[in-house]
């Protein structure tokens, strides 16, 4: 894991001859710096896989994909939302719109009046018009499309697919995005489950996060810290909602009652820098695991925002 949190998320999953970048919420330069810090070469990446379109998951996507010339995998809903985010429409008031309509109508009327008054043009007029037209067409080429990617591949939640040697099983999550997903990756007999940015653990998510060798689970906020913290009340309500983020308490409840305890590693991810403390997240998870933490099972790790987590090997 190269980064995890509200200022950027990115993880490298590798197996066989395939390397995938899961989310690209860091700038291209910072992503490459952290990959090299983690002894990973950016040029070895085969694809980028996106969970949803929020900026902390796609902020560096376009530049990175172009730099490496690799495909990006989205759901269709996420791809459309990402394109809208990069191509915002200009907002105008009703008064501005009405004035624009009147101006366009006046221009059309003036063109019609001019056409009615003009007689047949002589050859010199035609030559002048032809020159003017060619000059008018000689406009600068439009700026490069900010949504352009080397290749786009679509997938659908609930329908497994493969990227090289890695099997990908996407599943729907509850979050305020267009079509958010989590993943279970399978390669060479190892299964890794990724579930962050979810307001609650729905039955389908619970079913997916079983029989894993690695579980990456959101533990975003402490309830009391969030309630007393600096966020506006509307933002607090959004985080606490069923399409917001998973609290330490909710993550612990799943680890205690809904998790089968089979993973070698449990990684707590997407910790809030404003509304959580690593110690609070860790204590809640340790209590929930209730003695199941051992050298070869349920080793508890915390992903950080500012530095990569040490690589894990199976």
Image (spheres, helix red, strand yellow):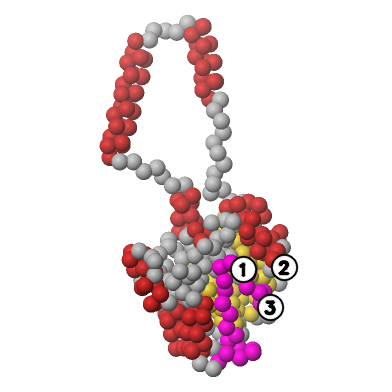
Residue 174, x across and y down, in percent: 41, 70
Can residue 294 be found in the magenta stretch?
yes
Residue 291, x across and y down, in percent: 54, 94
Q: In terms of sequence position, does the residue under pointer 2 or pointer 3 come before the other?
A: 2
* Residue 307 position (above or below residue 106): below
Q: In terms of sequence position, does the residue under pointer 3 or pointer 1 come before the other?
A: 1
Residue 6, x across and y down, in percent: 49, 65
- Residue 134, image quadrant: top right
Structural crowding at the residue carrying mark 1, measured as other residues with C-alpha within 10 Å and reported as few (<14), some (14–19) or many (≥20): some
* Residue 154 position (above or below residue 267): above
Q: Give the magenta-colored segment's residue range.
A: 292-312
Residue in the picture at 39% in, 77% down: 223
Q: Is residue 255 visible?
A: no
In the displayed structure image, the side of residue 24 where residue 95 appears, left or right? left
How far apart are the two marked residues, 2 and 3, measured between alpha carbons? 13 Å
Can residue 48 be found in the magenta stretch?
no
Q: Residue 152 has which mark?
A: none
Q: In terms of sequence position, does the residue under pointer 1 or pointer 2 come before the other?
A: 2
Residue beneath disc 3 = 313
């Amino acid at each position: 894991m190269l980064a995890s949190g509200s200022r950027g998320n990115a993880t490298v999953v590798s197996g066989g001859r395939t390397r995938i970048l899961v989310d690209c919420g860091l700038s291209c330069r910072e992503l490459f710096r952290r990959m090299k810090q983690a002894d990973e070469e950016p040029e070895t990446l085969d694809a980028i896989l996106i969970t949803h379109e929020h900026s902390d998951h796609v902020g560096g996507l376009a530049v990175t994909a172009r730099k490496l010339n690799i495909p990006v995998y989205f759901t269709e809903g996420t791809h459309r939302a990402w394109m809208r985010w990069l191509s915002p429409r200009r907002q105008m008031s009703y008064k501005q719109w009405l004035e624009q309509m009147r101006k366009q109508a006046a221009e059309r009327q003036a063109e019609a009046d001019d056409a009615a008054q003009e007689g047949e043009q002589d050859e010199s007029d035609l030559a002048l018009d032809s020159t003017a037209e060619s000059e008018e067409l000689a406009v600068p080429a439009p700026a490069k499309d900010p949504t352009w990617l080397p290749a786009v591949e679509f997938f659908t939640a609930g329908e497994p697919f493969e990227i090289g040697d890695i099997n990908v099983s996407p599943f729907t999550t509850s979050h305020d995005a267009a079509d958010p997903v989590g993943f279970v990756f399978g390669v060479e007999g190892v299964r890794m489950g990724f579930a962050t940015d979810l307001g609650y653990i729905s039955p389908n998510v619970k079913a997916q996060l079983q029989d894993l060798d690695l579980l990456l689970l959101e533990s975003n906020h402490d309830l009391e810290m969030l309630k007393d913290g600096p966020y506006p009340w509307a933002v607090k309500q959004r985080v606490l909602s069923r399409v917001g983020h998973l609290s330490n308490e909710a993550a612990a409840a799943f680890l205690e009652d809904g998790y089968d305890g089979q993973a070698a590693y449990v990684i707590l991810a997407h910790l809030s820098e404003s509304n959580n403390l690593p110690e609070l997240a860790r204590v809640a998870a340790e209590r929930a695991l209730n003695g199941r933490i051992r050298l070869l099972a349920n080793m508890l790790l915390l992903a950080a925002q500012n530095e990569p987590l040490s690589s894990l090997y199976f």
